[in-house]
Image: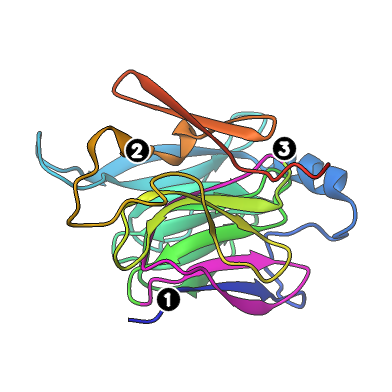
Amino acid sequence: MSPRLVVLTVLIPLAAACAPAEPDAPELAAASLERTPELVETGTRWAPPQGADGAPQVDLAWRDADGTLRAWPDIGPIVTATPCIDGALGVAADGTLWWVGVDGRAEVWDHGVTGTPAVSPDGAAMAWVTRETGLVQLRTNHEQRTRETGLETVGLLRFSPDGAHVLLVGASSSGVAGVHALSLAGDDGARCLSNCQLRAGQPWGAAFVPPPRAAADLVFDGSQVRWSVDGRTFAARWRRVVP
C-alpha cells in the first residue's frame, strides 16, 4: 500500500479563508484570531449511552462580547469544532467539514473528516485528517504542493508554537503508532519522534512509548515536546537544533 500524502492547499481567492489578509504579518493574524467571538454549545442533540463510544452531537453559537448569542446556520449537529480567523471549522456527525463564518456564512470544505481539525497559533494554517483517503490536508494562504508522509495511518494533529510544524500520531504500514513531526517547509516526509524502530508483531518490551491520547496532551517546551500517559511523562525533540 502506498504511503499517505500530505497536501498543502493554498486558495488565496477564497471568500471564506481562515487565514490572515497579510501572510507576512502573523501578529495581525493572531489579533484577528483573538477577536473571533466565543464559540459555545447551546444544546445536545445526541449523546452516547454511558460507557459507549462516540462523541456528543451538539448545536453551536457565537457569543459576542456583550453576551449576545448568534446561532450557527442550520447545518446539522456538530461533533467537534475549532475556532479560526473569522470563523470556525466544524466537523458534522457524517464527517463533513464545515467552515462557518462569524457573519453567518457556511461552506463545505471536505468530507470524511475524522477527529478535530488543528489550527496554527496565528490562525494562518489548518490541518485535518480524512477517513476515506487517509490524507492530512493542510490549508494555508501561502502555497500549494503535495508531499509524502511515509505513514499509513494518521491520527491526532497539533501545530507547533511557531506554526511551522504539525505534530501527529501515526504509523507506517508495518510500524507502531508514535509521534511524528512534519515540517511545512521543504520536501521531507514526517520525521519519527517515538517508537521509530518498533514493528507490529514483534515484542516491544520497555521500548514502547505510549502515544498521547489527545492533541492537547502535547506540551511544547523549547525544542522539546512532552506528553503524559497513565502518570508517566515522555519527551522528544520536535525541532532540529542547527548549530
Q: Which mark is residue 177?
A: none
Of marks 2 and 3, which one's residue comes earlier in the chain? 3
- Number of numbered callouts drawn: 3
Residue that mark 1 sits on: 3
Helix, strand or loop under label 3: helix
Give the mark nearest the N terminus, 1 or 3. 1
Residue 82 drawn at (x, y percent): 52, 47
Crowding near the residue tagged with mark 2, few <14, some 14–19, many ≥20 C-alpha atoms within 10 Å: some
Horizontal side of 90 relative to 243 (left or right) equals: left
For image coordinates 71% across by 52% down, the residue present is 164
Earlier residue among tags 1 and 2:
1
Please give the range of residues in magenta: 133-161
Report the Cα–Cα distance between label 1 and label 3: 37 Å
Compared to 40, does 143 lie above or below? below
Q: Which quadrant does the C terminus fall into?
A: top right
Q: Secondary structure at mark 2?
A: loop
Inspect the image, locate mark 3, and give the three-letter code of the amino acid beneath it. Answer: Glu
Which image quadrant is residue 70 in?
Answer: top right
Residue 71 shows in the view? no
Residue 112 figure quarter: bottom left
Mark 2, residue position? 213
Q: Is residue 170 magenta?
A: no
x and y, in percent, of residue 111 in the image: 40, 73
Dividing the picture into quarters, in which one does residue 37 lie?
top right
In the image, residue 187 sits, relative to residue 195, either above or below, namely below
> Which color scheme is applied?
rainbow
- Residue at the spot 44% in from the left edge and 44% down from the top edge: 194
- The amino acid pointed to by label 1 is Pro
- Evaluate if marks 1 and 3 touch, with contact meaning CB atoms under 8 Å apart: no
Can you identify the residue that label 3 sits on? 34
